[in-house]
Image (cartoon, rainbow, N blue to C red):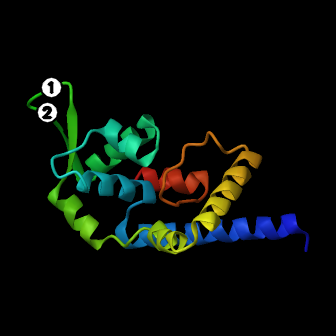
Amino acid sequence: MEKYEELLLALRKVIRATDLHSKQLHKLTGLTAPQLLILREVAAAPTGITASAVAQNITLSPATVSNVIDRLEQRELLHRERSTQDRRRVVLSLTARGVERMKAAPRPLQDNFINKFQALADWEQSQLLSSMQRIAAMMDAERLDAAEVLEVGTYEQQQFSQND
């Protein structure tokens, strides 16, 4: 097998593992990975957080985060509230239903990855990072909107789960 074939096979395995975890997450919680990530960000801010701060923290575009927040609000998992100090500021917080959903949610796939990655020597971490950045560049993927949560699937699957 050629080296490029081995590399592509390894990439497909990563995509498959991510896809399987995403499906398991949706089956167990009814949430997509981005929805769970946003709920985690909101839960981590006990006094509330703005949508723009969430977008910045999870490195997704504000428009994407806003759309996901709309769906989470419709499902009564979080709510928006205007700040009493600054009426221009809208703060997000979890509803009781959102808190319960978070308690039942499994750990994200990347938690296991992070633990294993951080156990590597610094030089090996740097080598892996550099290699993945190079692969992303070779795939013209540097400017794609991406979050730290690993999720894949077809466009139709993502649109279907986002509309739930």
Q: Which of 138 and 157 is in front in this view?
A: 138
Q: Is residue 98 left or right of residue 83?
A: right
Q: How many marks?
A: 2
Residue annotated with mark 2: 83
Q: Which residue is at 34% across, 47% downward?
A: 71
In the image, what residue type sits under mark 2?
Answer: Ser
- Tell me the quadrant of the picture where the C terminus can be found: bottom left
Indicate the amino acid at tag 1.
Arg
State whether residue 43 is above or below residue 17.
above
Q: x, y (%) of residue 24?
A: 47, 73
Q: Which of the 4 image quadrants contains residue 33?
A: bottom left
| Of 137 and 63, the residue lying toward us | 137
Q: In this view, does 118 lie above or below 90?
A: below
Q: Residue at x 63, y 64 (%)?
A: 123
Proximity of marks 1 and 2: CB atoms separated by less than 8 Å: yes
Q: Distance between the residues labelled 1 and 2?
A: 5 Å
Which quarter of the rendered picture does the N terminus lie within? bottom right
What residue is at 17 percent from the left and 52 percent from the top? 46
Query: How many other residues sit within 10 Å of disc 1, few (<14), some (14-19) or many (≥20)?
Result: few
The structure residue drawn at horizontal position 57% and vertical position 52%, both measured from the top left corner, is: 156
Q: Position of residue 149 (x, y in %)?
A: 47, 58
Graded by Cα atoms within 10 Å as few (under 14), some (14 to 19) or many (20 or more), the crowding at tag 2 reads some
Q: Where is residue 6 in the image (x, y as percent from the top left)?
A: 82, 70
Measured as percent of width and height from the top left, residue 132 is found at: 67, 57
Q: Residue furthest left?
A: 84
Q: Is mark 2 on a helix, strand or loop?
A: loop
Q: Name the residue under label 1.
A: 87
Farthest residue to the right: give it. Answer: 2
